[in-house]
Amino acid sequence: MTSAVVAGGVVQPYALRLVARPATPQVPEREPLPPGALVLTDDAEIADQVRATAGHDITVVLVPETMATSDEETVTGLLAAAGPVGGHLRVITSLRDAEWPAPPRQGLVALQEAAFVALKRLAGSAHDDSSVAILVLDRLDGRAPHPHCALLTGLAKSVVWELPETHVHALVTDAGFTAAVAQLRVESGCAKGLPVAYYRTASAPVGRWEERLVPFGELAAAVGHSGAEGPVVVAAGGARGITARCLEGMSPPPSMLWLLGSTEPEAMAALSAEIGDLSGADYVRAKRLEDPSVHIATLRATYDRARQTRESLTTIEALRERIGAERVRYLGCDVTDPAAVRRAAAAVAADSSRIDLLVNGAGIGGARRLQSKDLATFRRVRDTKIAGHHNLKAAFRDPAPSAWCTFSSVAGAFGLPGEIDYGPANDVLNASARYEQGRGSHAECAIGWSLWGESGIGPRTGFTDYTAKTGQLGLLGDAEGQRLFASMVAPDRIGRHPSPVLLGEAERRLVRTRFPGLVDDGIRPPYLSSPPHTRQDDTVWPLDLSRHDHLRGHVRQSRALVPGALVLELAAHATDHLAGNGLVDRFQDIRFGAPVAVDPQLAEYTVAASFVPSSPDGGVVRVAVQSQLGAGNGDRRVTHVELAVPLGDDVPVRLQPPQPSVRRAPATMSMSGLFDQVRDFHVTDDTASARWEPSLTAREFFSSHRLPWLLIDALLQTACATGVPHRYATPHSITEVRLHTRHNDLALADQATSVRLHVAHEAGVANGVAATDDGTALVTLTGLVLSGRDGVA
């Protein structure tokens, strides 16, 4: 995996993905439409449904689309006429008729802006019982929400930073209005991870989805080829900042580079001459001497713009020196102006028959806390990202770029303080890239950058200094950023992960604190490495058990093997990661294919897991221990053990256990250390019984175990006993192992309660129970198919 060292620690790339995850209540549920709530919507039918559903006093404001062009005073007046915000704000809309890639409809834009103004009003009176809930009705085509949902759900991610005492949650669902309101109630009790969930109920599989930051499996460094022709690149916002730095680092360099900037070339020269070599203070002083009535803020704004223009001119000259004077063209183009973007696209098309890569790095910053931010700034920041994105998509169609790369931000992935405009705008870009991947029309990615310490918006606004002092975000160096960019836009990789997010240790620490469960939470399971990576639809952990000496007591033919019961422990931890720390009380359809060695020689073991939903609060986690054979054996993957972990009550149990295709003689095995735990064997043709007597050391280590897996192993030893010491039958499959206790082995051992093991055999199938002397079941085992127990002693 390629990583970069920054001031905030090693950067790792993560994929911002929608993953199936059941609803796991964490806090008491809240009323979806509480008394006194202010409800904003842009849909008259929804307004009527809200009034009919609430059954008590609420205030519903139908936001007209004309508010999208009104000033903040007018929007504030609309809300003030409805009365005070109170403590509860609800925002509801429908995107079921929204088109793509058309820009967001004016009514939705007006609704977002009204929500922003309402949130500003709420910020002055927020309290511990206040709440904000957002409900979006969507088709959820191809499992992905419409990108414009993020205009509102992105607000939720930002508001949790601005109003930490307020309960915030958002829901996107394809359900009808009544069912959606019920789902909104359920979501109010789910407090882990981001405050946004997605419910898909109209198509199979039915389930609940949420965004997770999943580590890449691999991100190899891009390799330049000196003889290769460089790509034709169009870059919006490419004349300065991080976009320019990324272009400078491309290898091979572009064969043709079109730079789109917001200022016309003639104006750039005039602005640069305006400030000459003056500092900011000297420029303001000189202009005030010429005209004492001019505002200092106006002069400072002019100077900043001129300084940015000078930076652009310097960058353009540097790019021309590297690539060639005739191969770098600059076009004045404000991406928020559709006509200007069309003119730029026509100029490119007249000269270039193809575009290999379009990079959209246009963006402006306006980091400021919610109550201090005005609607005009909110619009400028949002429109530069979203309107610019749609204008570029509409104009650059002939020739259409082979690949798109948009510069997004970590603020779009999980919000940040002061970024209630920038965060949702970038979240739309993330959602757009994921949506386009589902359509399969072209390669596209939106890179979620954190702060660059030398270039970018942060250094020009002072925000970098602020975050460096607080340690909230790391600072990425230019060279490291260039290498990461080159890796992600390599022709054979771009779009493989449509919304990559780059996190250093500072960002991971921030996310773990604010949104536990969104990314690797830092908790290390006893046997699985962390963080995992992804392989197709699976989450995969490398499995190296060689350092765990306590596992070496389970030996067959001088080779230490991993007991099958330990795989259940691994499966429980994988389930926790994929589906939350809910109740894991049964394992089904367990199949043993090949033994797992504690010390593998040629093989490298992995644990692969995936969650398949069957309802919003349930489904099945499928887990497999696999190995990839090393060199000389070909690229062959072996499945050693596989099983299912059902979550919920609607997963059927396999009633007829499969018969083994190969019958094996009893194996010679020795049990020592932890595994020498079964006493007083009594074996007959149709029964086996014994007593569990564990001996645990390393108490701190075993306290982190999830299950009583040693007790399960003792029950399996009893079931496989042949009556001859050290001779055991071979297990092939198990229909179900069910837990009737929440205690692990250490907790059960500390209770000093005698545990009896009893197994009944019939026609090669065993059913067993581990129970206390008073008959309280701790573990039951159903449908164990084994061979090699015929003619027991």
Image (cartoon, rainbow, N blue to C red):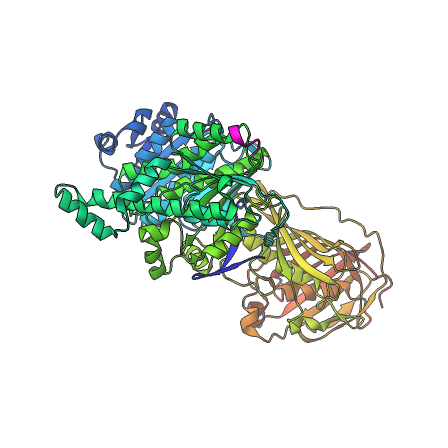
Q: Residue furthest left?
A: 292
Q: Main secondary structure of the magenta part?
A: loop
Residue 636 in the magenta stretch? The answer is no
Vertical placement of 676 versus 358: above or below? below
Residue 152 place in picture, x, y as percent = 39, 37
- Report whether residue 693 is seen: no
- Report whether residue 660 is seen: yes
Vertical placement of 549 versus 62: above or below? below
The image quadrant where one finds the N terminus is bottom right
Q: Is residue 90 left or right of residue 558?
A: left
Vertical placement of 94 versus 668: above or below? above
Residue 412 place in picture, x, y as percent = 43, 45
Viewer-nearest residue: 400 or 474: 400
The image quadrant where one finds the C terminus is bottom right
Residue 241 place in picture, x, y as percent = 41, 48
| Highlighted range, magenta | 350-354
Vertical placement of 530 versus 613: above or below? below
Q: Is residue 572 left or right of residue 333?
A: right
